Each structure stands twice: as C-alpha cells, then as structure tokens.
Amino acid sequence: MIGALWGFAEATLFFMVPDVWLGWIALTSLKRALIATLAALVGAVAGGLLVAGVCAYVEPATSFRAMDTVPAVSPAMIRDVDADVAERGSRAIVDGPVRGIPYKLYARAEGIQGGPDVAFVFWSILGRAYRWVILIPLIWLVSHLARKWLHFTDRQARGVYIVGWCLFYAWYLTTVAWS
C-alpha cells in the first residue's frame, strides 16, 4: 500500500523517489520488496496518467508553473523534457531515470502533446520498472552480504542505508537538480 501511494505521489508532485521505501523493505525481504515494487509501479503509472490527463486540459504555462514548484525541478529541465517528448514521443521516458529527471515531467509533456495513450503506458511501465528491477535485488544482496560477511545487525544495515540516501540527495540536490 505504501509503495503504491509513494509511486503515485512521486509521479505527481512529491520529489523523493519510491526507491527509498522499496530499498528499505529490501533490506530484510526481497519478496516483500518485489511486491511493493509492483505496487509502486501501478501507483506511478496511475499518477502519470493523472498528470498527463490534467495537463492535456490546462494551459501549458499553468502546468509548467506547478512543476517548477517541485524541489529539484528547474525550468530548463521542464523545457528539455518538453522538447524531448515532442521529438521522440513517450519513449523518451526511459531516459529519465539515468538522467535524474523526474517521471512527472514526462507525464506533463505527454499531456501538453495531447494526452496519454497506450504508448505512454507502455513506456511508463518500462521507464519506471527497469531501475527498480536492478536496484531492489541489488540492495537486498548487499544487505544480505553485509550481514553475513561484515556481521552487520539490522540496525547497522538500516543506518548505512539511511546515510546512503542522505548522501545521494545531498549530491542530487546540489549537482543534478536545478541545472
């Protein structure tokens, strides 16, 4: 349930990726984390469809201003995504995760191009899932090995995990975002 809500929230106006929650679960249970990943995927696509649908009906300047209020989103980032989606269509979504560009911007761009379609749903699923399919089992594996080889306790593993995300967001918010 939390995974679906987090996926939906991040696809709309929340700025922290569902990976944080999914990885937290993966620290102790790969099965539960994969189920939560599926829920996050459903929530993210639903959120993307909502954003794209709303943005198909509001003025582009209005949705631009709304997205510009999201932490770590810059006007240049919004314009770049608009241009990318105008040129390549929904398949541009798959580049977002590796470029540090929020999915919500692709959903907005899809909306101002006329609204979501079947291709948007397909590319959304692929674009949202491929990072999680790699990251979540990797977090589980590293956590498992840290417990086995380094004798980490659950508390230590969670502490390292929290510090890792804090460092990531400190880097992201100062290096990638707003550039």
Image (cartoon, rainbow, N blue to C red):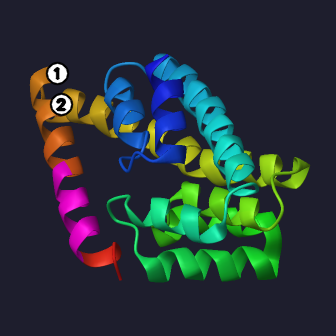
Label of residue 154 in the image: 1
Who's the residue at 45% across and 32% down the image? 6
Q: Residue 34, image x and y in percent?
A: 54, 26
In the displayed structure image, the side of residue 135 where residue 170 appears, left or right: left
In the displayed structure image, the side of residue 46 where residue 80 appears, left or right: left
The residue type indicated by label 2 comes to Arg
Q: Which residues are magenta?
A: 166-174
The residue type indicated by label 1 comes to Asp
- The residue that label 2 is drawn on is 158
Element under disc 1 = helix
How many neighbours does mark 1 have within 10 angstroms: few (below 14), some (14-19), or many (20 or more)?
some
Do the residues bearing badges 1 and 2 touch, measured as CB atoms within 8 Å? Answer: yes
Label of residue 171 in the image: none
Q: Residue 38, image x and y in percent?
A: 62, 28
Element under disc 2 = helix
Who's the residue at 36% across and 32% down the image? 21
Who's the residue at 54% across and 35% down the image? 8
Q: Is residue 79 above or below residue 153?
A: below
**Residue 178 in which image quadrant:** bottom left
Q: Quadrant of the C terminus?
A: bottom left
